[in-house]
Structures are given as C-alpha cells and as structure tokens.
Amino acid sequence: MTAQIIDGRAVAATLLGTIARDTAHFTETHGRRPCLAAVLVGDDPASHTYVRMKRTRCAEVGMDSRYIELPTTTTTASLVAEISVLSADPTVDGILLQHPVPDHIDERAAFESIAPGKDVDGVTMHSFAAMAFGGTGFHSCTPGGILRLLDAYDVPLAGRRAVVVGRSPILGKPVGMLLLARDATVTYCHSRTRDVADHVRDADIVVAAVGRPELIRGEWIKEGAVVMDAGYNPGNVGDVEYAGAAERARLITPVPGGVGPMKIAVLLEQTLAAAQSAHSG
Ligand code: NAP
C-alpha cells in the first residue's frame, strides 16, 4: 500500500478562507477587527520567525495583531503583569505567549495569567480541563489541528486504537484527550515506555509528538494505519521515518506541510471565536 498524503496546507487554506469571510462579517457588525496579542520574551530567532508568521496570517484574514516584545531579563512577575494588562484590555481578544520562555521564568505562572476567555492557544489549566472534560474552552492549537485534519479526511475514531508518542502538556497529552473524547482507545508512550514499537504496531492511528528525528520506524506502522507526524526537527525531518511509513500507512502527514500549517489556522479560528463571544454577552 502507498499512503495517501494528508495535505495540511490545503486543509488550512480552506479553514483560513472561512475565517477571513467570518472575520469580515464580524468587523462589519461590530466596527472593529478581532485582535490577537503575541508576547515574546527573549531573542530566540525561531520564536521571532513564528510570531512574524502568525502576525502575517492575522493580517491576511483581516485581524489586528499586537506585538509585545520583552527582553530576556524579564522576570516572571513583570511578564505576569504584562499579560494581566492584556487579559483586562477589552480591545484584545486573544493572547499568545510564544513558547519557550527563558529558563528563569515560571512558564506555568505566565500561562495562568492569560484570561481563560482569551486563551486562544489553549495553554491554561482551564483550557486543559475543558479538553479533558469536553467542556467549553479552547483547544491547544496543534492537537486541535490534528483532530481537524483527521476529520477532513473522514478518519473514523470511535473504537479505534490510537497511540500517541509523547506526553507534553501542549501536544501529546491534549491530543490524546481529544482522541479519547471522540471515543478512540488511547495509549500514551513516553521516554519511560518499554517497547514503543509494540504499541505502535497495534495502532490504527499513530500520533508522533516527540521531537526526535525518525524515532518511529516505518516498519512499526501497521498496514492501513493513519500516521499524524507533529514532529518538526532540523532539516525538515519528522518524528516518523516517512518513506518506510508511507509504504504501509493508508494516510500520512508529510513534514513540512502536514500538521504544521493547521496550528496557525486553529489559533486564528479561536481568536475569532473569542472575539465573537466577547460580544455575545
Ligand atoms: P517535549 O515537550 O520535548 O515532549 C517530548 C515528549 O516525547 C515527552 O513526553 C517525552 O517523554 C517523549 N519522548 C522523548 N524521548 C522519547 C522516546 N525515546 N520514546 C518515546 N517518547 C519519548 O516536545 P513537544 O513540545 O511536545 O514537541 C514534540 C515535537 O513536536 C517537536 O518536534 C516539536 O517541534 C513538535 N511540535 C510541532 C508543532 C506543530 O505545530 N507541528 C507544535 C508543537 C510542537 P517524557 O515525558 O517521558 O520526557
């Protein structure tokens, strides 16, 4: 079997088109554009690139963006104070704290200073609980994007075996929770898991969220499985050995052009939703 490639760029472009149309309607109705505030601490070049891309996409769909750039020496207290001001500002709909922050900052404290209604990147405990309990709240963007891709390709989830390799709070854990909420049978693998290969061999759906190039070997993939590779390693290499996996899978995401483009689309979709809910009562 040769896998069909999941075209994340195309799915994201369709979603961005819908967001642009709905944003224009919002702006016409309320006389202002939705606004995303991006906070960046320090001078990590990759983080600067990510924030620039997000701001460009905001402009493309007709949203405003605000950029708060803070020095590496910023303390947790002053970062929390900056974010709290944005949380209370009625002209800001969504807040994004670019990850990672410098080591001396308590990232959790900074995330928790984002008002839940503006947590469009889905990083607060409130959003995490909403994902776990199926309540009202925003999804962590990459996990939300992975679910939207699975839906775009009509992948059945109920009763299927899903193996998530990785358990980070922004990626592995929430994607497993979203799959569980859709009635998949979910197994998490992590750095202490014995025999990751055996778990993967059993999976109808494999989500790779590790950050180690080609850790998941092609021969581990079950014939006909669906492979979602969220890994992004230097040299445009994913966490799955693509060539080998594509020979066995039914559907597979490429790196780049698979999961990645969905992240910003979900971020903007949630920013618009936050703006709409700010006006709904
Ligand atoms: P992370 O916080 O470093 O977490 C990595 C996870 O992988 C941890 O849970 C770790 O287990 C597990 N792990 C490490 N070595 C392993 C091994 N040998 N076998 C099994 N599990 C192992 O990374 P992250 O932030 O979740 O990111 C993971 C990858 O996704 C990175 O490549 C990142 O660039 C990418 N990413 C992509 C997007 C996107 O939009 N495409 C968004 C976010 C992240 P322990 O918990 O036991 O340490």
Image (cartoon, grey):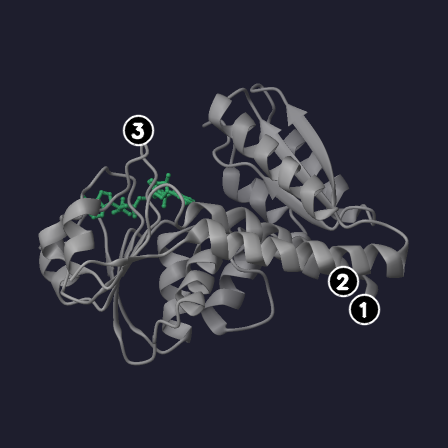
Circles 3 and 2, Cβ within 8 Å, touching? The answer is: no
Q: Quadrant of ligand 1?
A: top left
In percent of the image, x 20 and y 60: which residue is there? 249
* Residue 140 visible in the current orientation: no
Work out how far the residue at label 3 is from the one at label 2, CA to CA, in angstroms: 39 Å
- Residue drawn at (43%, 61%) of the image: 149
Instruction: From the top left corner, tell me how far across and down residue 234 is, in percent.
Output: 32, 29
Q: Name the residue rendered at 65%, 60% in the picture.
A: 18
| Depth order, front residue of 206/78 | 206
The quarter of the picture where the N terminus appears is bottom left
Label 3 sits on a secondary structure element that is loop
Q: CA distance from mark 2 to mark 1?
A: 6 Å
Residue drawn at the location 72% of the way across and 58% of the way down: 21
Q: Along the polypeptide, which appears first: circle 1 or circle 3?
A: 3
- Mark 1 burial class by Cα count in 10 Å: few <14, some 14-19, many 20+: few
Query: Residue farthest to the right?
Result: 31
Residue corresponding to mark 1: 280
Of the two numbered discs 3 and 2 on the same chain, state the one appearing first in sequence.
3
Give the amino acid at mark 3. Answer: Gly
The residue identified by callout 2 is 276
Indicate the quadrant where residue 86 lies. Answer: top right
Q: Amino acid at mark 2?
A: Gln
Instruction: Please state, as top left, top right, bottom left or bottom right, where the C terminus lies in the image.
Output: bottom right
Please give the residue where the numbered disc 3 appears in the rendered image: 235
Q: CA distance from mark 1 to mark 3?
A: 45 Å
Q: For numbered disc 2, what is the local secondary structure?
A: helix
Q: Amino acid at mark 1?
A: Ser
Q: Mark 1 and mark 2 in contact (Cβ < 8 Å)?
A: yes
